[in-house]
Structure formats: structure tokens, C-alpha cells
Amino acid sequence: MVRPAVLYNLRLFHDKLRREEQIGGRIDAKISPHISPGSTLICAIGNYWQPGCLQAVLEMVRYTHDQGYEVALYEERDRCYQPFDAIGSMRNTAYLRAREEGWEFVLYVDNDVRPHQDALVRLLSRWVPIISPKIIYSDGDAHGLDMPKMEEGRGLALVGSVVLSFILFKTAVFAPWWQGDFWGNAIGDDEEVHFRKLAQVGHRPFVDTDVVVECVNPPHFPLDSQPRHNGPGKLWRP
């Protein structure tokens, strides 16, 4: 039997822009294909938005859609009854939902971030599995963190761990934890713990120093102070 010299790979799309700029560009660049390149499910951890933050995120959603990307925003319901006891469950539910619905990326956003409208589009243009913008705090303090002190405009920086205030993951990153057990709930399961787990399967996060996102509230370290409870079913706040 003689095998044909050409193997068909026929793809038909309604959207000419998507076909030429996203599908075609990815194939040429040897980037793994996806039925909806750059599609992103945005998960807000809770719905306790600080002033101006929800509006900023919604403007980012609309801008991302206008650039030709499939995008959705939803608020993950508050599951916490003790200090931060179910933040992991909330994050796990988000990536399970993203994988089940077929999104290529999941973006975690806290309720106190104010991104520029093009923040997500710029992160997506990097085509890396885990990426965060440079996070700065409204009060101008670095709060003991290295990220706010990083020099802006220096492109991508490969780092060991990042804060989770605004972070984009390719959903395939979570394939080893397909049952939804990546994020831990214990207070001790901080960013370092999670990024060490990711390093074991070959993933380290990038910071895009060209993209800056403002965080209204300072970071809170659970062991530093006793948080107060906002009532049953409410996220704990410092």
C-alpha cells in the first residue's frame, strides 16, 4: 500500500482574524494549537470588591473581547468559615471549571486589583504557561516583597514564586492535578509551597515587568496578625 504524500489538516473558521493571526501564527511558531487560542476564564476570588476594582476588571474583559479573544468573568462563591480555610477549594474549583469548559487559560484575580484594560491581552501575547504582571501597592510600600521593587520595562523575568493577586495560568498546567487537588487550604500552603510543587513538573512563573497592576490593599500574611471574621460564609479579612 502506498501512503499519500500529503496528510490533510483542513481547518475552517468563521473568523478571518482568528484564522490568520492566531491559528496561523501559532502553527508557524510551533505553539500548541487550541480551538479558541487565548480564550480565558477569569475567576474572581469572592465578590468583596474594593472601590473601582470591579469596574477596572470589567473594562479589561470588554477590551480583551474586542481584541478577538473569547473571555468570561465569574465570581467564585465564598466558601470560607475559618481564616482562609477554603481559598484553596475556591481556586481548585476555578481551574476545574476552566478545564471542563475548554478554556485555554484561567486568570485568577483578587477583589482588590485595578488592572489597565490591556493587561490580560498583553500577558496572553507572551504565550508562556504561568505569568503575572508586576504587582504594586497603592500605598507605595513593597511590604517586604521583591516584586514591587522589580524594574519596570525589562520584559519577562523568570522567578521562583509570585503573589496570586492577578495571575494567568494555562489550564494544561493543572493536568497532573486533574482531580482538583492542587491548591491547598491550610494557612501554611503559601505561594512558595505551590510554586515548589509546580517546579517538580517543570513549571516556573514569569513576571512581565512591562505590565503593571495596582493592588489596593497591602498583602496579608495570615500568621502575622489575627484576622477578623466577616460572618458565616464570608472571606476572612485582616
Image (tube, helix red, strand yellow):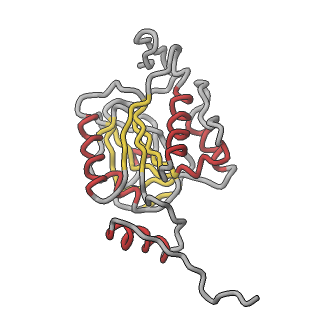
**What residue is rendered at 23% in x and 33% in y?**
52
Does residue 7 appear left or right of residue 226 in this picture? Answer: right
Could you tell me which quadrant the N terminus lies in?
Answer: bottom right
Q: Residue at x 61, y 39 (%)?
A: 194
Residue 176 image point, x, y percent: 67, 46
* Foreground pick, 155 / 174: 174
Rendered position, 25 above or below 97: below
Query: Where does the image place residue 31, in percent across and percent down from the top left?
Result: 52, 68
Q: Residue 38 versus residue 220: which sits nearer the camera?
A: 38
For image coordinates 27% across by 34% down, the residue present is: 53
Indicate whether 117 appears above or below 82: below
Q: Quadrant of residue 220?
A: top left
Most foreground residue, 52 or 180: 180
Residue 167 position by quadrant: top left
Q: Residue furthest right?
A: 1
Instruction: Tell me if residue 5 comes above or below residue 168 in the rendering.
Output: below
The image position of residue 238, as x and y in percent, is: 41, 19
Q: Residue furthest top?
A: 231
Q: Residue furthest front?
A: 1
